[in-house]
Amino acid sequence: MKFVTRKNLPLVEEAPIEDFCTDHRCCPDRFPTAEFPSPTSCLSIDELEELEKEIAVANELLLDLALDNRPPEETFRKALFGLEGLFVEVKLLTGQTVEGKVHTAGFDFVVLLDDKMETILPYRVIGKVEPKGRFAEHEHEAQLRDIDPCLRRDITSFFGATVASSPKLLHLFFRMRLNIYLLFLETKTIEITMDDEVIKGFVTDVNKETIVLKVEKDVKIISMEKIIMISIKKEN
């Protein structure tokens, strides 16, 4: 019960508060509770972190493509490496358009694959690259995670000699140059597109500056600088 003082009257008893069918004096003291900010996204923390990483990668890619003052080898090398495993549309400075899945992003070239053809493009002839397909996803895979333990030891202990003896490792760590990649095409029939002609022939030799084709009974020596595109038909 609560007692109040009224002027010129003795202490009197006041009726209890019955608004909530309880005496207000029995309510416990209210302790402060922790306050948290409202969530900024409907995604879970893990999903939000993954999305933010993908946004950062996309922003970096757009930045690389926008820096026109860089040499094309530097610009497209990094951009196409980030697009490996994705379908892209490549617009060439010659006005041609090539589509395919980015298979290999080398030091100065890119290899695109489709159902029927393998296409090799030097970076110097590329004008623009755009991802193709709304739901394309990167192939996230650690390429050396499941390698043979002996190879892992050799890479760790004898890095230079081990990597130099393997084109695949050489490309993985340093990015293969076009003239080195073309060595894999020896004894194969390819089609080379240049500014003024298209030559189809059998690869007999490759060096740093030229590629040699056998065209029927003739031998054609083609400068690397003249190559716009190399096409290899897939074997069934």
Image (cartoon, helix red, strand yellow):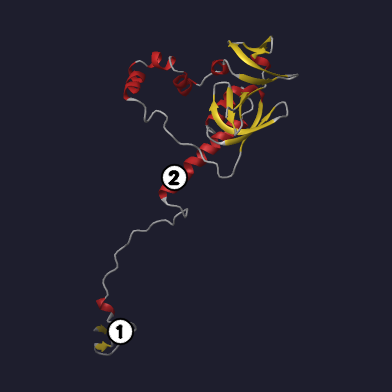
Amino acid on which the number 1 mark rests in the picture: Cys
Q: Quadrant of the N terminus?
A: bottom left
Q: Position of residue 158 (x, y in %)?
A: 35, 15
Q: Position of residue 59 (x, y in %)?
A: 55, 37
Residue at 26% x, 72% y: name it: 28
Determine if residue 70 is in view.
no
Tell me the CA gap for discs 1 and 2. 50 Å
Q: Position of residue 209 (x, y in %)?
A: 61, 10
**Is 27 displayed left or right of 188 in the figure?**
left
Element at label 1:
loop
**Label 2 element class:** helix
In the image, farthest residue toward the right: 196
**Residue at position x 50%, y 38% in the image:** 138
Give the residue at mark 1: 21
Please tell me in which quadrant of the rendered image residue 162 appears.
top left
| Amino acid on which the number 2 mark rests in the picture | Glu
Which of the 4 image quarters holds residue 204?
Answer: top right
Give the quarter of the figure containing the C terminus. Answer: top right
Name the residue carrying label 2: 49
